[in-house]
Amino acid sequence: MNKTIIQTRCPVCKKKRSPMDGRIISDRKGSFVVHNKCRHCSTTSLAVVSKYRQNGGQVLAVETLTDLDQEEAQKFIDARPFSMDDVLEIYQTFTN
């Protein structure tokens, strides 16, 4: 994917990130999922970035550390959502 996004600093080593450290791996309805890999300490993270039209178009970003590489993260983003039957099956597995 050729889109990049600029993040300010790595959450672990606090060094400034380059625009090439982040890749948009999902772009849906004004929300983006960005996979970041720090070139200084190799920490990887996923950030969800959303722009809200209310309140003057504010941007909300939430970032979490991960051990997933870009391809693994993409696989989970593209997976089908859990159904209620899936949740019930998991519950029954752990309660029986």
Image (cartoon, rainbow, N blue to C red):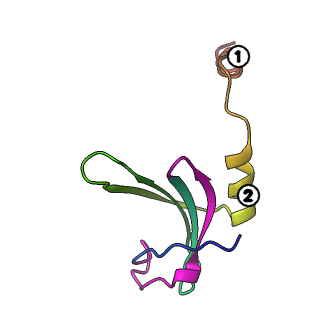
Task: Point out the image quarter for the N terminus.
Answer: bottom right
Q: Nearer the viewer, residue 37 or 95?
A: 37
- The span picked out in magenta is 9-30
Q: Of the residues shown, which amino acid type is indicated by label 1?
A: Asp
Find residue 24 and report its image quarter: bottom right
Percent x, y of residue 34: 56, 63
Picture layout, residue 50 above or below residue 86: below
Percent x, y of residue 63: 45, 59
- Name the disc covering residue 19, or none: none
What residue is drawn where x is 68% and y is 14%?
92
> Which element is circle 2 on?
helix
Give the class, few, some or many, for how many residues have Cα within 10 Å of label 1's Cα (few <14, many ≥20). Answer: few
Reading the image, the residue beneath label 2 is 72
Q: Nearer the viewer, residue 3 or 78?
A: 3
Find residue 14 and report its image quarter: bottom left
Magenta stretch encompasses residue 65: no
